[in-house]
Image: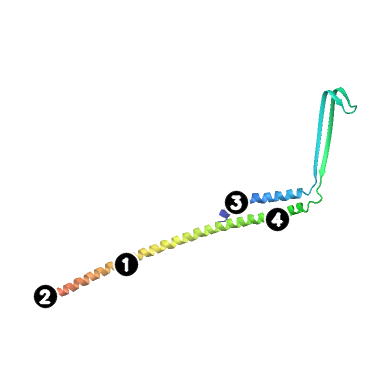
């Protein structure tokens, strides 16, 4: 029975769905924690021009090639967001705990259903044994009843036969 319970828990689609929900709630928690960290973005760009171009240093038209490069780094940090990020973290923690309890509750329900089905099978087997035994007893009772009926019929026939023989002898004596 233990193997059946383990198999049922491991191969149940609802358990797999609840495990995915639990993993999603853990990801949500990490995401909420990540919202507390600062953002850092960087950008680098280059460009090149060939031909008649405007020289940015002399502000005159020249023929040639000019390469330019630029870079940018930005960072943002939320100092106060009305405790929104803290509340998201707390909600994610509670969702993870709730999903763990739901998963364990589902596994317990599956275990109970397997055990109940097993006990129902055992009960049905015993009921079948009892029914077969009752059938055998009923057959024996039927056989005995038939034998009794046959023996009574014989004895009644004999007594009727004896009585009729006695009547015959009485009637012959009266003549």
> What residue is pinned by disc 3?
14
First reached walking from the N terminus: tag 1 or tag 4: 4
- Badge 1 density bin: few <14, some 14–19, many ≥20, Cα 10 Å: few
Image coordinates of residue 146 in percent, x first then y, are 30, 65
As helix, strand or loop, the secondary structure at mark 3 comes to helix
Residue that protrudes farthest toward the bottom in the picture: 174
First reached walking from the N terminus: tag 1 or tag 2: 1
Distance from the alpha carbon under mark 3 to that under mark 2: 97 Å
Q: Quadrant of the C terminus?
A: bottom left
Image coordinates of residue 116 in percent, x first then y, are 54, 59
First reached walking from the N terminus: tag 3 or tag 2: 3
Distance from the alpha carbon under mark 1 to that under mark 3: 59 Å
Q: Is residue 93 left or right of residue 111?
A: right
Q: Residue at x 62, y 50 (%)?
A: 17
Closer to viewer: mark 3 or mark 2: 3
First reached walking from the N terminus: tag 1 or tag 3: 3
Residue that protrudes farthest toward the front in the picture: 60
First reached walking from the N terminus: tag 2 or tag 4: 4
Q: Quadrant of the N terminus?
A: bottom right
Q: Residue at x 47, y 61 (%)?
A: 126
> What residue is pinned by disc 2?
172
Q: Which mark is residue 145?
A: 1
Q: Is residue 21 left or right of residue 45?
A: left
Distance from the alpha carbon under mark 1 to that under mark 4: 74 Å
Q: Residue at x 30, y 66 (%)?
A: 147
Q: Residue at x 76, y 50 (%)?
A: 33
Image coordinates of residue 125 in percent, x first then y, are 47, 59
> What residue is pinned by disc 4?
94
First reached walking from the N terminus: tag 4 or tag 3: 3
- Badge 3 density bin: few <14, some 14–19, many ≥20, Cα 10 Å: some
- Marks 4 and 1: in contact by CB < 8 Å? no
Distance from the alpha carbon under mark 1 to that under mark 2: 40 Å
């Amino acid at each position: 029975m233990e193997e059946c319970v383990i198999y049922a828990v491991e191969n149940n689609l609802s358990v797999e769905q609840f495990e995915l929900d639990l993993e999603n709630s853990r990801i949500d928690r990490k995401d909420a924690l990540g919202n507390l960290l600062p953002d850092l973005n960087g950008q680098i760009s280059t460009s090149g021009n060939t031909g008649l171009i405007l020289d940015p240093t002399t502000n005159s038209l020249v023929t040639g090639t000019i390469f330019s490069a630029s870079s940018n780094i930005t960072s943002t940090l939320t100092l106060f967001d009305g405790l929104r990020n803290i509340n998201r973290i707390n909600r994610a923690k509670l969702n993870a705990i709730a999903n763990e309890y739901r998963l364990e509750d589902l596994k317990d329900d599956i275990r109970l259903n397997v055990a109940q089905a097993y006990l129902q099978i055992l009960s049905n087997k015993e009921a079948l044994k009892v029914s077969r035994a009752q059938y055998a007893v009923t057959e024996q009772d039927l056989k005995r009843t038939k034998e009794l009926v046959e023996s009574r019929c014989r004895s009644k026939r004999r007594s009727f036969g004896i009585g009729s023989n006695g009547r015959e002898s009485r009637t012959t004596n009266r003549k």
